[in-house]
Amino acid sequence: QVQLVESGGGLVQAGGSLRLSCAASGRIFRITAMGWYRQAPGKQRELVAQVTSGSSTDYADSVKGRFTISRDNAKNAVYLQMNSLKPEDTAVYYCNAGGLLYGLTGFDSWGQGTQVTVSS
């Protein structure tokens, strides 16, 4: 019922930058939080960064000072600016959004994932 479309992944050298984008569509009444998770091969999916409707943010310790999450409430979109990328940032990055649909049914949706590869 809620679709998340991600873009912006790719291959970059260590120290480089990438910007991920994610747009949500559907019968969305309100999005309470949007965020980015990542999953590297052989590892569990982990939270990278999250932003609430009130613009409160939370970051994984490993990305603090390098990544910045931002949100455009009017577009139901979330962005992740990734600077000073490291090889250990290599993973599939997933967009996540949670909130309410019209009719006040809750939702928690995931994007299809976008590959980020950082070469050393």
Image (spheres, helix red, strand yellow):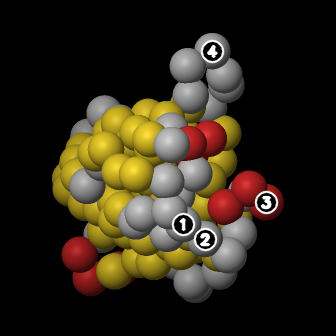
The residue carrying mark 1 is 84
The residue carrying mark 3 is 61
Which of the two discs, 1 and 2, labels the residue nearer the N terminus?
A: 2
Residue 42 visible, this angle:
yes
Q: Which amino acid type is marked by label 1?
A: Ser
For label 1, the SS is: loop
CA separation in Å, label 1 and label 2: 6 Å
Q: Quadrant of residue 27?
A: bottom left
- Relative to 32, is 116 above or below? above
Which of the two discs, 3 and 1, labels the residue nearer the N terminus?
A: 3
Q: Residue at x 34, y 65 (%)?
A: 19
Residue depth check, mark 3 versus mark 1: number of the one nearer the observer: 1
Which of the two discs, 2 and 4, labels the residue nearer the N terminus?
A: 4
> Residue 9's spot in the image, x, y percent?
30, 48
The number of numbered discs placed on residues in the rendered structure image is 4
For label 3, the SS is: helix
CA separation in Å, label 1 and label 4: 24 Å
Binning the other alpha carbons within 10 Å of mark 2 as few (below 14), some (14 to 19) or many (20 upward) gives few
Q: Which amino acid type is marked by label 4?
A: Gly
> Residue 48's spot in the image, x, y percent?
61, 53
Q: Residue at x 50, y 62 (%)?
A: 15
**Quick check: marks 3 and 1 in contact, CB under 8 Å?**
no
Binning the other alpha carbons within 10 Å of mark 4 as few (below 14), some (14 to 19) or many (20 upward) gives few
Q: Who is closer to the viewer here, 92 or 71?
A: 92
Q: Which amino acid type is marked by label 3?
A: Asp
CA separation in Å, label 2 and label 4: 24 Å
The residue carrying mark 2 is 66
Q: Quadrant of residue 62?
A: bottom right
